[in-house]
């Protein structure tokens, strides 16, 4: 029955789109024409969510949650926006954004694994902290140095967004599915105490998971800023939902 659940949901979804979606979804040919015309924009717009979804899956496997991810992406984007555009952006803002994202994600992991703060409390606190730092960095300004960076806008187009998503899902997905790391995360999520007695380095695994979420947040920040061209302190509010 579980195997039939997803196909059944897809059938219902198609039926609903067919009923309310207008002429585009009244036939298979119409739907194909619609996605041929708008599919690239849909993927480019959805790329940050798709990237973060992979990381959130890892978090949920550990019986955790990360409410700070939207603010984390925004803070990384704001930090990169603090650098001037141009070719030098690739050697300054990009490395800073990458390291910052990994450290912020790791900070969540340390709060949860080392200080034993419940994930919902820890990430709620960092969500507020990261958003506050966004306003500290940006104030009421909206900056757009990304428009002056050669080649940066490509990541906001279909091909660039597809590449980011494909690297994560087509390369990271199969490796993760067959790895020992996946089994350890599942055991950790099922019973953290039992996992510790089984020899699994619980603290290390939790820190790794949240650091990976941070790295994916960096990719999401790149995809978002490349597509939108600008960022403000209030950008990406609600992305964690």
Image (cartoon, rainbow, N blue to C red):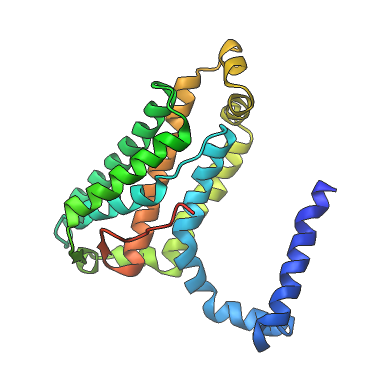
Q: Residue at x 57, y 37 (%)?
A: 176
Q: Is residue 78 above or below residue 173?
A: below
Q: Is residue 100 above or below residue 137?
A: above
Q: Is residue 104 above or below residue 53?
A: above
Q: Is residue 90 visible?
A: no
- The mark total stands at 0
Q: In terms of depth relative to the viewer, which is nearer, 195 or 153? A: 195
Residue 90, image x, y percentages? 23, 54
Name the outermost residue toward the bottom. Answer: 23
Q: In terms of depth relative to the viewer, which is nearer, 7 or 136? A: 136
Q: Is residue 4 above or below residue 144?
A: above
Residue 151, image x, y percentages? 29, 65
Where on the picture, by quarter, is residue 88? Answer: bottom left
Q: Is residue 181 visible?
A: yes
Name the outermost residue toward the right. Answer: 1
Q: Residue at x 42, y 46 (%)?
A: 216
Instruction: Please state if 41 lies on the left or on the right of 128 as rendered.
Output: right
Where on the picture, by quarter, is residue 236? Answer: bottom left
Instruction: Please state if 82 lies on the left or on the right of 42 as rendered.
Output: left
Where on the picture, by quarter, is residue 74? Answer: bottom left
């Amino acid at each position: 029955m579980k195997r039939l659940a997803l196909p059944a949901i897809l059938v219902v979804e198609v039926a609903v789109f067919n009923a309310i979606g207008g002429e585009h979804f009244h036939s298979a040919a119409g739907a194909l024409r619609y996605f041929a015309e708008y599919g690239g924009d849909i993927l480019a717009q959805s790329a940050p969510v798709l990237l973060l979804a992979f990381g959130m899956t890892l978090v949920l496997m550990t019986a955790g949650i990360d409410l700070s991810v939207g603010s984390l992406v925004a803070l990384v984007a704001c930090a990169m926006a603090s650098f001037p555009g141009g070719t030098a952006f690739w050697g300054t803002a990009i490395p800073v954004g990458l390291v910052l994202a990994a450290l912020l994600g790791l900070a969540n992991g340390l709060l949860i694994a080392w200080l034993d703060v419940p994930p919902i409390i820890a990430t709620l606190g960092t969500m507020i902290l990261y958003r506050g730092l966004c306003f500290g960095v940006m104030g009421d300004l909206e900056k757009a140095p990304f428009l002056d960076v050669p080649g940066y806008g490509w990541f906001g187009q279909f091909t660039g967004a597809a590449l980011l998503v494909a690297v994560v899902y087509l390369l990271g997905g199969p490796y993760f599915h067959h790895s020992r790391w996946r089994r350890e995360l599942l055991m950790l999520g099922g019973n953290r105490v039992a996992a510790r007695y089984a020899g699994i380095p619980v603290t290390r695994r939790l820190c790794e998971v949240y650091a990976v979420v941070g790295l994916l947040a960096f990719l999401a920040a790149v995809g978002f800023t490349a597509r939108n061209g600008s960022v403000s302190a209030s950008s990406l509010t609600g992305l964690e939902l």
